[in-house]
Amino acid sequence: MTRQQHLLTALAATLGLLCASAGSAAQDNQSDRLFRECRAAWADNNIGLADELCYKALMHPDVNAITPDAKSQRLYNYAQLKRMLGNWEGAEELLRESLTIEEKRAGSAPDLPLARRLAELSIACAAQNKWAEGIDMIERLYPVAGQFQGGERAAISELFRNYVPQVATAGKMDLARQLNEFSDSVPAREPGFINR
């Protein structure tokens, strides 16, 4: 794995942690129970069991009874788990399905939930050296990037910083300049130190 892919993996983890707290409303069916068990196993760092339970939650027929927003959030969370397992193809597939739901919901006005899927998908594409597909996601993400705040804004800035060389190589110099300007406007986060 290249240095850039390692950075993108770390960035994905940061963005995932910032976004994972937005859970879906609990329903009352078997799929919901499996999903809650998945989240509990994940919280206990039992990643293998969490993977199995999240899969079962999304494959159970009861999943059709949940709202599209809840399904999108489950797909998004499961994609983050797949990413933790290094299964970038699985993460990409789940993110594309979540993105489709978000596109229907958001319509012509992209918002942060949709933008988060674009960011995660661009990271999954980069990890698989699918830079051209990732650049397509970055182009769609850029107009919404100004809505991010705090740690998410810093994560998006780092994502853009990592994409600048690829975008320039693709001959999209105007976009590369815009990404670079956005990244320069958001200072890199200082490393944290332990206070005794």
Image (cartoon, helix red, strand yellow):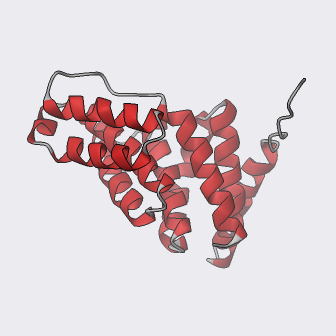
- Left or right of 113? Residue 34 is left
Image quarter where the N terminus lies is bottom right
> What is the x, y in percent for residue 191?
83, 40
- Left or right of 123? Residue 38 is left
Q: Is 28 located above or below residue 117 in the figure?
A: above
- Left or right of 59? Residue 162 is right
Q: Residue at x 64, y 69 (%)?
A: 167
Q: Is 194 located above or below residue 145 in the figure?
A: above
Q: Residue at x 63, y 66 (%)?
A: 5
Image quarter where the C terminus lies is top right
Q: Tell me the quarter of the picture where residue 36 sits.
A: top left
Q: Tell me the quarter of the picture where residue 93 sits.
A: bottom left
Residue in front for this viewpoint, 194 or 82 = 194
User: Which residue is the extreme one toward the left?
Assistant: 61
Q: Is 194 located above or below residue 59 in the figure?
A: above
> What is the x, y in percent for residue 37?
30, 32
Residue in front for this viewpoint, 156 or 128 = 128
> What is the x, y in percent for residue 127?
55, 67
* Residue 174 appears in the rendering: no
* Residue 8 appears in the rendering: yes
Q: Residue at x 67, y 55 (%)?
A: 160
